Image: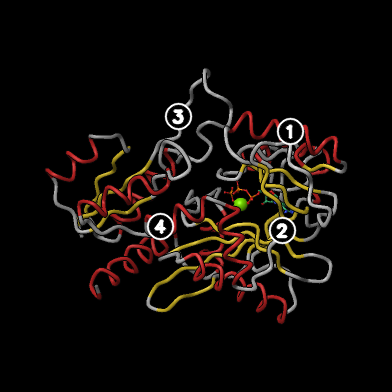
Amino acid sequence: MRVALTYNLKKKDPLKPADYFSECDSEETINSVVLALRTKGHSVEAIDVEYPALFSYFKKNRVDMVFNIAEGKHGRFRESEVPAVLDYLNIPYTGSDTFSLALALNKTLTKKILRAENIPTPNFQLFVKGDEVLDPDLKFPLIVKPNCEGSAKGINKTNVVNNPGDLQVQVKECIHIYRQEALVEEFIEGKELTVGILENGKTRVLPILEIDFSNCKKSGEYFYSWKMKEFQGNRELGLVPEFHCPARLDKDIEEKVKDVALRTHRAVGCLDISRTDIRLDKFNVPYVLEINPLPGLDPKESNFPIMAYAAGMKYEDLIEAILLSASERKRLN
Ligand SMILES: Nc1ncnc2c1ncn2[C@@H]1O[C@H](COP(=O)(O)OP(=O)(O)OP(=O)(O)O)[C@@H](O)[C@H]1O
Ligand SMILES: [Mg+2]
């Protein structure tokens, strides 16, 4: 197949905030995806997305499929930018469509859909201005998150609060810095799990990944905060989470967690691939935090490839599976 890989490159720019490029992809990831596709016999051209150069590229070059990992540039629909261009030009692409990408990036709207589907998600309230009265049903500790970010941008340990005063400070700061609403959720103490769904022939739920932060005490970080994600593996900082794949769960709980992830994938309308982040509380209720239709694909660092490896796949098999799932959809349409 002739494939174009669309991506946004992670750059270093001291004038931008430290987390500015966190969602974008590294050269290692881009090179690995290109190599995987070539290993499977496809011709590939990688395109760091710029507009309107993207339009001109596709006007000049015919491709069979776009392998899309572009996170987009601006605003709350950014992950849909490339798919929207491709929809307009009638070019097929891997992964979720324009609509589902925009939906999943909006945590509150996603949670409303999960609620309607009886999928457990932490109790929440959206703060638009910051001076709203706290819903008395919400129980501290609470966590404050920007409503439309990924890669844990804006999620630090100070975002977990235990009283109304700290809550107000964090909400105002979140709205001010990230120029968007703040989502306030009950903080679920318990196991951190993430579940990969890969559609290839039939939809498969990959072995669950458990991320254990108990080794990270020295760092003062205790959940998958921005710092934990950005500096994961740094021994000096003590940011050394332990990965268990499959997760250490009883069979019945494992099934329950997988079912919730699959139902989330379907409720949001994801295609080919998704990763659902879950916290299991002390009563073993799997609370869905969010779904990622463009999960990181760094072969060494990202959560999704770890789950694929545990399922017996090599990195190139994972990349090929995504491509084939999208091609099969194109054939059927
Ligand atoms: N309600 C919650 N209860 C407990 N921990 C939470 C909650 N919300 C978020 N967290 C912690 O913060 C992390 C990041 O939150 P979340 O997944 O919502 O953000 P994100 O930016 O979309 O992440 P990603 O990097 O997966 O895109 C979670 O993996 C979890 O460790
Ligand atoms: Mg997450």
Quarter holding residue 231: top right
Which of the two discs, 4 and 1, sits closer to the camera? Answer: 4
Q: Secondary structure at mark 4?
A: helix
Return the x and y of residue 116 as percentages of the image width and height.
60, 70
Q: CA distance from mark 4 to mark 1?
A: 42 Å
Question: Does residue 184 sit above or below 249 in this rendering?
Answer: above
Mark 4 residue CB less than 8 A from any atom of ligand 1? no
**Could you classify mark 3 by the number of other residues whose Cα lies within 10 Å: few (under 14), some (14-19), or many (20 or more)?**
few
Mark 4 vs 1, N-terminal side: 4
- Residue at 45% in and 52% down: 102
Return the x and y of residue 243 as percentages of the image width and height.
67, 57
Residue tagged 1: 236
- In the image, taking residue 176 as reference, residue 30 lies left or right, namely left
Q: CA distance from mark 2 to mark 4?
A: 28 Å
Q: CA distance from mark 3 to mark 4?
A: 27 Å
Quadrant in which the N terminus appears: bottom left
